Amino acid sequence: MAVSQGQISDTVGQYLTRFPDERNRLERLTDALAGDSAITSRKEFNGHVTCGVVILDADWRVLHIRHNALGRWLLPGGHLEPEDLDLVDAALREAREETGLVSTGLRLLEGCGDIPLDIDVHAIPENADKEEPHHWHFDLRFAFNLAGSSPVRLQAEEVSGYDWLDFDAMPAVELTKKLANHFMAGQ
């Protein structure tokens, strides 16, 4: 069964219980959940849910990919698909598709469970080739430890490179703070 709006709403509610100071920052997402937008559909251009992965290696570096369409370093992730059973399943599928890392080598970060470590709301520019107008992504980012040393195999259609970045080199400042706080708290 596909991910439902109810599942997303429950997950966002649990996230906001953990991070209540982010309610204003996520207002566009909570408004979409309260309305009648089909936020599980990538064709909902007022905003739709995507799932990202924060993958930490044994040296506590975070995997980033060079996204072809946007020309930027990003966390692996992408749109929901009808076959996704839940949000964590969608994040694991995206990790597998973009990086070749299999879910058996990824473990949810201790202390996070199936609640995202971060939710990011960001604008996506118009893409005439895909006939997509400017729109919003509500990116639920789940954190995983990489067990062992699995090789990264990139999905060449979407990704042109990868790098393992230390926390202080990551472009996502708020996520960097959350990771640092998570580990300083001894989680």
Image: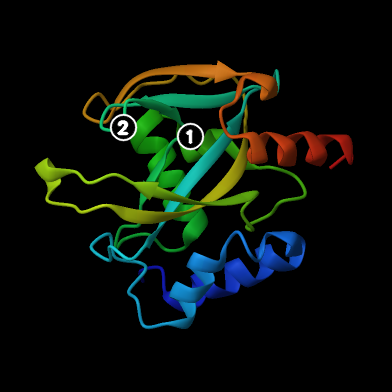
Q: How many numbered dots are placed on residues in this image?
A: 2
For the residues labelled 1 and 2, the Cα–Cα distance comes to: 12 Å
Q: Decide: few, some or many residues near mark 2? Use Cα within 10 Å; few <14, some 14-19, many ≥20.
A: few
The part of the image, by quadrant, that contains residue 62 is top right
**On the image, numbered disc 2 is attached to which residue?**
70
Residue pictured at 23% horizontal, 63% vertical: 43
Tell me if residue 108 comes above or below residue 58 in the rendering: below
Residue 66 in percent (x, y) is at 38, 23
Label 1 crowd bin: few (<14), some (14–19), many (20+), radius 10 Å: many
98 above or below 149?
below
Disc with the residue nearer the chain's start (1 vs 2):
2
Q: Position of residue 181 (x, y in %)?
A: 81, 39
Residue 55 badge: none
Residue 181, above or below 161: below
User: In the image, what residue occupies the spot 39% across and 49% down?
Assistant: 123
Of discs 1 and 2, which sits in the foreground? 2
- Describe the element under mark 2 as helix, strand or loop: loop
The N terminus - image quarter: bottom left
Q: Is residue 126 left or right of residue 92?
A: left
Whether tag 1 and tag 2 are in contact, CB under 8 A, the answer is no
> In the depicted view, which residue is nearer to us: 146 or 62?
62
Is residue 179 left or right of 123 when viewed as pictured? right
Mark number displayed over residue 75: 1
At 84% across and 42% down in the image, what residue appears? 187
Give the colour scheme of this rendering: rainbow
Percent from the top left, x then y, of residue 160? 31, 19
Picture coordinates of residue 127, whole percent (x, y): 19, 43
**Residue type, label 2:** Leu
Q: Nearer the viewer, residue 187 or 96?
A: 187
70 lies above or below 24: above
Kind of residue at badge 1: Leu
